[in-house]
Every structure is written in C-alpha cells, then in structure tokens.
Amino acid sequence: MTLDLFGEEDLQQPARIERIGAQAYVLRGFALPWIEALLSAVEAVLQQSPFRHMQTPGGFTMSARLSSCGDLGWTSDGHGYRYSPVDPVSATPWPHMPEAFFNIAAGAANAAGFAGFVPDAGLINTYSPGAKMSLHQDKNERRYDAPIVSISLGLPAVFQFGGFQRSDPAQRISLFHGDVMVWGGVDRLRFHGVLPIKPGNHPELGEQRINITLRKAG
Ligand code: SIN
Ligand code: FE2
C-alpha cells in the first residue's frame, strides 16, 4: 500500500529555465502538464508508423528505434539521411503531426525566444537501456533559421551539447521526463548526442526513454 500524502499537483516540479548557450535552453518540466495528451499522441503515431531500426549510410544499425510524423519524416538508409513525405515501411504518408506535439513545440520555442515556430517534422526516438545517439549536427533541414525543440520522456538521459566541431568539448546535461530543450539561432548547428541510457524502469514508460524532436524541415 502507498500512502497518498500529497496530491499530484503538489509534487509537480515548477518549470525552470536553464540557459546552456546564447540561444539554447533547457525548460525543466515544461511538458509535464500535457504528459497524458503527449503519450496518447505518441501511441497514435506508432499505431500507423511503428518504431523501426534504421541503417546509417555507413552501414551501421542505429541503437535507438525511430518513427516520424508530420509532412516530412526523417529517415536513414544505405543511401543517406533525408526527409521524406512517405514512410518507407508503409509507402504511405507519415501520420499527421499531433496537436499536442505542435502546441508544446510552439509554446517551448516561444518561451525560448523563437516566436512563430511551425514544425513540419516530428521525429520520435525510443532508447532501450544501452542505446545512444552519437554526436551529430541536425543539418538535413532546408534552412537553419528555425530552432530545434526536443521533448524528453521516460528514463533519464545524459545529453551532450557540444560545439561546432565534433571534437569540441561538450556540456553534459541530465534530461528528465517532461524536460524540453530548445536550441536555435547561433546555436542551431551545435553537435549533440545522447550517452548510453542507464538501465531503469520509469513508472509511466517502463524500460525506455522516448525523445520527440520537432523541426521545420521543408
Ligand atoms: C536527436 O538528436 O536526434 C535525438 C536527441 C535526443 O534523443 O535527446
Ligand atoms: Fe539531433
């Protein structure tokens, strides 16, 4: 039996903004008020376009599994990284961008100083314990004037936020369920990645971390 001493609202972390670059921010707990809507939106996307492993152009298999939604979905195979209007598995358009993704992304971007953000690409990654994302730049988008908005759910992660060369030193930032990162402007092309996820069991998402990245790709 658990003692319910506090209502859920009382235990909610207050939103805090941490600045990690000239135009880069971690909005702690920003997504917490909308977690239920977010998770059912993730479910709906996955029903149509399930998580799948992707190959890198170099012939490796990415350890995170990916899905997408919106007008453009990010995909990778032996021929390269690109955005496609069609899910290569189903050969039909990606699921629509859920309203919850769109609203949180626009709200977070606005809070970070990027008014009018209209994402057209939503990438969903799931990381099992041990999975990681190597340092990379987001540069498959047509232009770089819109920010990147990144929502963390489930198990915590250590995010690496680096410089403009792969070898530049990287800040290590712990990201937790409900945290939202926004980086753009002069920080838009910074290298970033995720260290291997530590084993654990999240009360809502189990043994995984889910990341949703919203971008303007087209
Ligand atoms: C990515 O950069 O594509 C994912 C970052 C993350 O999982 O936090
Ligand atoms: Fe990225």
Image (cartoon, rainbow, N blue to C red):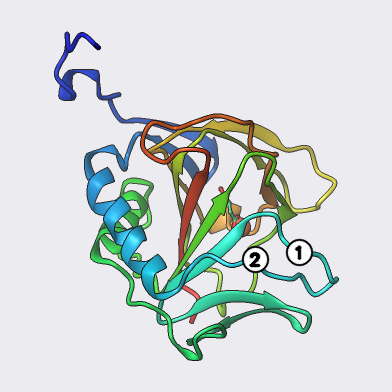
Residue occupying image coordinates x 82% and y 65%: 60
Circle 2 sits in a helix, a strand or a loop, which is it? loop
Query: Around disc 2, counting alpha carbons within 10 Å, would you say few (fewer than 14), some (14 to 19), or many (20 or more)?
Result: some
Q: What is the quadrant of the N terminus in the image?
A: top left
Task: State left or right for residue 40 relative to residue 141.
Answer: left
In front here: 191 or 152? 152
Going 17% across and 8% down the picture, which residue do you hit? Answer: 5
The foreground one among 75 and 202 is: 202
The x and y percentages for residue 26 are 46, 38
- Residue in front for this viewpoint, 38 or 162: 38
* Mark 2 beta carbon near ligand 1 (under 8 Å): no
The kind of residue on which mark 1 rests is: Thr
Tag 1–tag 2 contact (CB < 8 Å): yes
- Label 1 crowding class (10 Å Cα cut-off): few <14, some 14-19, many 20+? some
How far across and how far down the image is residue 81, in percent? 69, 76
Q: How many marks?
A: 2
Q: Position of residue 52 (x, y in %)?
A: 58, 67
Q: Is residue 167 left or right of residue 14?
A: right
- Look at mark 2 in the image and give the residue it sits on: 53
Q: Is residue 208 above or below residue 120?
A: above
Task: Answer above or below: position of 103 versus 12.
Answer: below
Left or right placement of residue 130 versus residue 210 in this view: right
- Decide if residue 115 is in sight here: no
**Circle 1 is placed at which residue position?**
61
